[in-house]
Amino acid sequence: MNLRSVVFLALTFLFLGFAVATWLDRIPIKALRNPQDPDLPFYMRQPSWWAIASAALGVACLHAALYSRFSMLVMLALAAGVWLGLVARMMLAKAVSEGREAAPMPWWRGDLGIALAGGAGIAVAVALMAKSGGHEVAAFVAVVLAICGLVAVGRWMGAVVGMVVAGER
């Protein structure tokens, strides 16, 4: 294992550790705080964008360290996004059942707007990989864009599934 791989693996653990600490709301920086219902178990809490972006950077570092192409690690981002969307819908349903109402939000800041931005990120990642000829820096950037985009699209898909399931009851 060469020095470059060791550095990227160390960065992987750093970014993923930051992502988990942000998700669990353990970072003592006020700007990064993501207050949520303390009664929820940790796996039902919605991670902030800081956590998603740092996890994407961690996976991109792992990708660079292992010199792999777009792999199952990237495709797992879609499953993670669907899970986040379902969790968001369950949290919204819980808030509504407790009598709290969600603040109205314009469409471009809601699930659909985030999904469109995620789809654009995926398109840029694919174009970047096609145009770069497999350059390492371009692959690093493309993996980060693809993961963030897949999480955003998956989150919207999970929200849609959550609404369909709630509508059938």
Image (cartoon, rainbow, N blue to C red):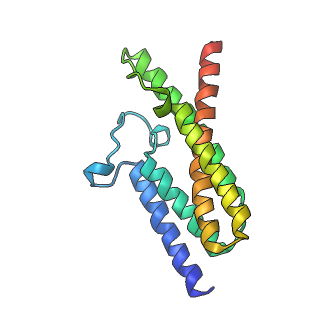
Q: Nearer the viewer, residue 133 or 47?
A: 133
- Identified at 37% across, 33% down, the residue is 39
Of the 4 image quadrants, the one containing the C terminus is top right
Residue 19 in the image: state x and y as whole percent. Answer: 45, 56
Q: In this picture, is 97 found above or below 162?
A: above
- Identified at 52% across, 27% down, the residue is 89
> Which residue lies most toward the bottom here?
2
Residue 142 in the image: state x and y as whole percent. Answer: 62, 60
Of the 4 image quadrants, the one containing the N terminus is bottom right
Q: In this picture, is 51 found above or below 86?
A: below
Quadrant of the rendered image containing residue 156: top right
Residue 161 in the image: state x and y as whole percent. Answer: 64, 27
Residue 96 relative to residue 145: left or right: left
Is residue 51 among the parts visible in the rendering?
yes
Residue 34 relative to residue 118: left or right: left
Q: Nearer the viewer, residue 102 or 20?
A: 102
Is residue 80 among the parts visible in the rendering?
no
Residue 43 in the image: state x and y as whole percent. Answer: 50, 42
- Identified at 51% across, 57% down, the residue is 55
- Identified at 38% across, 22% down, the residue is 103
The tally of labels here is: 0
Q: In this picture, is 30 found above or below 98?
A: below
Residue 119 relative to residue 53: left or right: right
